[in-house]
Amino acid sequence: MEKKIALITGANTGIGRATAIELAKKNIKVFLACKSFERTKPVIDFINKSHDRILAEWLELDLSKLRSVKDCADKFLLKNIPLNFLINNAGVAGIRGKTDDGFEAAFGINHLGHFLLTKLLIYKLIQAENSRVVNISSRAHHNVKSIKWDNLQKHTLSFTGIEEYAVSKLANILFTKKLNLVLKVNNSHAFCLHPGVVDTQIWRQLPFFLRPILKLRGLLTPEESIATIRHCLFEAKPQEGGKYFEQSRVSEPNKLAQDEKLAEQLWAFSEKVTKVFQ
């Protein structure tokens, strides 16, 4: 049987780590795209020691730097291997600032970095056929009333960064909608999901006074949270491509997330600002 290959961003901890371990159990080779080798090495060692051959490798990736995203994609492409699964998992919440390229931090990391990575790898996904892209979003997108385009290239304006996080998660859904139209011509598909409120390091930048709210909402473990990822990778129907999932079922996102014109606008904006790296 032909060996499948997956690339997972943010796979050194939390949901990404749990997903990498799960896929390796299915004999899928996993590339862990993360910033730090030192923080990723324990996961790689755990996976490789659990199997009789090398099933995990590290790729350097800093989503806050578009040059790093380009370098990561180039290194993968040089391997001249297929790409069956791309899981855009890495993310930040409650962070404030701007990326090195001048974008609001959450938008730049959670959406734009993943947009560029996916675009650079898209022909590999199309060539593989029946490939799947899974974008990790959040129910937080329901709080967004509009996208203020000018703010996407400004320092985080809100005190907590949660408003900007929600916008980035809306962007994940809109991106998935348009991406699926591109992929499905060759029977490949994109899916987007809310994994649940998960006890991971994504919340490490969240202001201290907001953290008890997460506890009250009932945090899932990373291992519990990957059920919907598993569903989208292996069980979701092709006609469900481009959809948003919660608890392994198609769920209705907010009205903005269903706006095809807005999805086109976001794609065009993202293309324009990342063009120099494509």
Image (cartoon, rainbow, N blue to C red):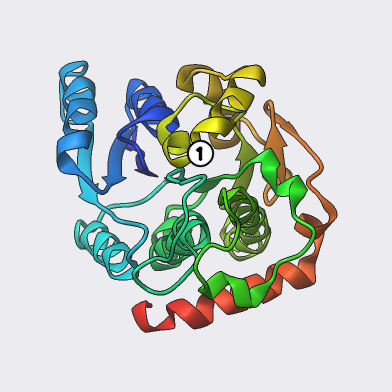
Q: Is residue 183 visible?
A: yes
Q: Is residue 11 left or right of residue 145?
A: left
Q: What's the residue at 50%, 56% (across, down)?
A: 106
Which residue matches tag 1?
A: 207
| Residue nearest the viewer, comparing 102 with 180 | 102
Residue 211 occupies which quadrant of the picture?
A: top right
The total number of labels drawn is: 1
- Residue 43 sits above or below residue 61 on the image: above
Q: Is residue 86 visible?
A: no
Q: What's the residue at 46%, 60% (across, down)?
A: 105
Q: Split into 4 quadrants, where in the image is the N terminus?
A: top left
- Indicate the secondary structure of the residue bearing disc 1: loop
Q: What's the residue at 46%, 46% (across, down)?
A: 92
Rate crowding at label 1 as few (under 14), some (14 to 19) or many (20 or more) other CA atoms within 10 Å.
Answer: some
Q: Is residue 117 left or right of residue 132?
A: left
The kind of residue tagged 1 is Pro
- Residue 237 sits above or below residue 273 on the image: above
Residue 134: x, y in percent?
54, 44
Residue 188: x, y in percent?
56, 52
| Residue nearest the viewer, comparing 189 with 9 | 9
Q: Is residue 96 left or right of residue 149?
A: left
